[in-house]
Image: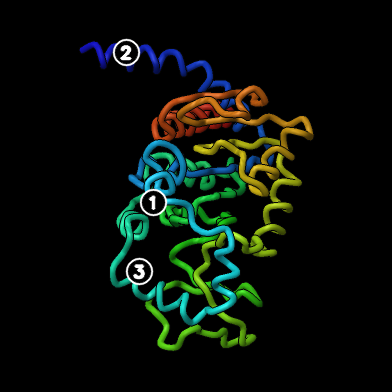
Amino acid sequence: MTESIDRDEQNDLHQESIERAATLLAQSHYCIALTGAGISAESGIPTFRGKDGLWTKHGEPPLNQYEQFSDDPAAWWQKVAERRRNPDELTATISQAQPNDAHFAMAELERIGVLKHIITQNVDGLHRAAGAESLTEIHGCTTLLRCIECNMRWPFDEIPEVFPPRCDDCGGIIKTDTVMFGEPIPPDCLQRCYVESSQADCVILVGTTAVVSPAADFAFAVGQRGHPMIEVNLDPTVITNYCAVAIHDRAGELMSRITAEVKRLLANAAS
């Protein structure tokens, strides 16, 4: 009973902020989003850093990861094949994860024309699975392969027969789409982020501490032009004080409530 009362009090506490966030979203002409690991934590995907983070438990990948791949891509592909046969914790968790309410809420905001684009730092493909279409996965996606020369992408349905596989179009080496330490962000992703953020008049940051560049830079660019930033995160972050609205609780519940309020405001405006 006490837990239920506490939850009701928390909901009442958030209501004003939810209404303000929804008003900003409904009034925007071109809203974009930046999402991070926090939005997928509710789908059971562990974060990398922090108390139970994968890197905390198993150690961070080497900072010269891309250099190692470039030196011997065939050996790297052998390891990929082995990991597909015997998945590690992250591989197994991502393969089984499903979108949560926050992913579906953001896809709904896109469907009704309020959210124009999502920039995600996540590689899990859950925004895609939830139905988002205007999407930049700036750190890549585990379900895709990418040519490192022409940036062509394909579904990662099965392990290639030849290591390393090569692009039929340009002959470039193919790797998984996820961006490694030491690997440049694919230029097509950077260009898309620049185009989307340069025309945005509102940005909502969901489940991200916004400290990783260049993804965070695109969100901050919107705020630096004087447009509102909205934060939805479990805990306060370094960007909290820069936001017009900052709400700290579970992203699934908050985004569902914000989306419902946006739809109510739009329906009232149309009537």
Q: Secondary structure at mark 1?
A: helix
Which is nearer the eye, 86 or 67?
A: 67
Crowding near pointer 3: few (<14 within 10 Å), some, many (20+)?
Answer: few
Question: Callout 3, which amino acid?
Answer: Arg
Q: Residue at x 64, y 47 (%)?
A: 215
Q: Residue at x 44, y 29 (%)?
A: 254
Q: Which residue is mark 1?
A: 58
Which is nearer the eye, 10 or 179?
A: 179
Find residue 71 and report its image quarter. bottom right
Kindly report which numbered mark, 2 or 3, lies closer to the viewer in this rendering.
3
The numbered mark at residue 6 is 2
The numbered mark at residue 83 is 3
Kindly report which numbered mark, 1 or 2, lies closer to the viewer in this rendering.
1
In the rendered view of the protein, which quadrant contains the C terminus?
top right
Residue 95 as seen in the image, left or right of residue 255: left
Residue 189 location in percent, x, y?
Answer: 65, 60
> Of label 2 and label 3, which has the lower sequence position?
2
Above or below, 108 against 138 in this view is above
Residue 195 location in percent, x, y?
Answer: 73, 53
Question: Callout 2, which amino acid?
Answer: Asp
- CA separation, marks 2 and 3? 44 Å
Circle 2/circle 3 CB separation < 8 Å: no
